[in-house]
Amino acid sequence: MKAEKLPTTPAKQIAVFLAKFDPKVAKVMRECRTQMRKLLPPANELVYDNYNFFVIGYATTERASDCIVSLAAAANGVILSFYNGAALPDPAKLLLGDGRKNRFIRMPTAAILNSPDVLRLIRTAAAKAKTPLPKTGHGKTIIKSISAKQRPRRRAGKENKLDKK
């Protein structure tokens, strides 16, 4: 079987990755991504189309270890993930999860990113970053990995138009 050739630009590759999802999930992910670019313009977008999730991490460098926050999409929706979320002050109790480091917020809509409490979490995470975020400039979008084998990107019973081709 011949490997499918991906488009050459990151923007077109991301469009192909998102087309695998239910349109509602893809829409939330696109809207969240647009908002995150406005919130953290100097951050690099590190893109992973992995086995479990489609992830866009916002990092101070090109290293995943310098990620401030990530958007992750799966068949059941989108989350905003804070790699060091366990160390963030969260007086509004928005962060979910009980791991040693990671915490997340479910994103049924991108409007949640406009909440003062969520904005405070993002700003605090950026301020606590191991490597400081540049004060100016625009980050790059970098496709870091694409897994050949992936979990379904749609819930069972949801037909993907791409599967018909």
Image (spheres, rainbow, N blue to C red):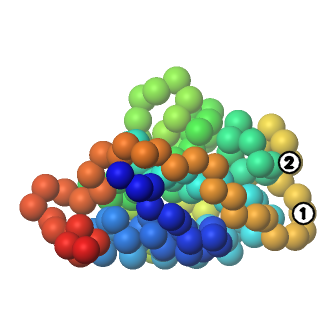
Question: Mark 2: which amino acid?
Answer: Pro
Q: Residue at x 30, y 46 (%)?
A: 151
Task: Please state the horizontal and vertical placement of residue 8, each as a whole percent of the image.
Answer: 63, 70
Residue 120 shows in the view: no
Q: Quadrant of residue 35?
A: bottom right
Tell me the residue that label 1 is attached to.
135
Q: Is residue 138 left or right of residue 118?
A: right
Say above or below: 27 vs 36: below
Q: Nearer the viewer, residue 130 or 86?
A: 130
Task: Please state the horizontal and vertical placement of residue 32, each as a whole percent of the image.
Answer: 51, 69
Where residue 13 is drawn, which disc sits there? none
Say above or below: 129 vs 36: above
Name the quadrant of the C terminus.
bottom left
Q: Quadrant of residue 119?
A: bottom right
Tags 1 and 2 touching, CB below 8 Å: no
Q: Nearer the viewer, residue 100 or 94?
A: 100
Tell me the residue that label 2 is attached to.
132
- Judge the density around disc 2: few (<14), some (14-19), many (≥20) Cα neighbours within 10 Å: some
Question: Mark 1: which amino acid?
Answer: Lys
Q: Nearer the viewer, residue 9 or 77?
A: 9
Say above or below: 27 vs 25: below
Q: Residue at x 27, y 51 (%)?
A: 152
Q: Residue at x 63, y 56 (%)?
A: 143
Task: Please state the horizontal and vertical placement of residue 100, each as a whole percent of the image.
Answer: 52, 23
Q: Is residue 71 left or right of residue 119?
A: left
Task: Please state the horizontal and vertical placement of residue 7, each as a whole percent of the image.
Answer: 56, 71
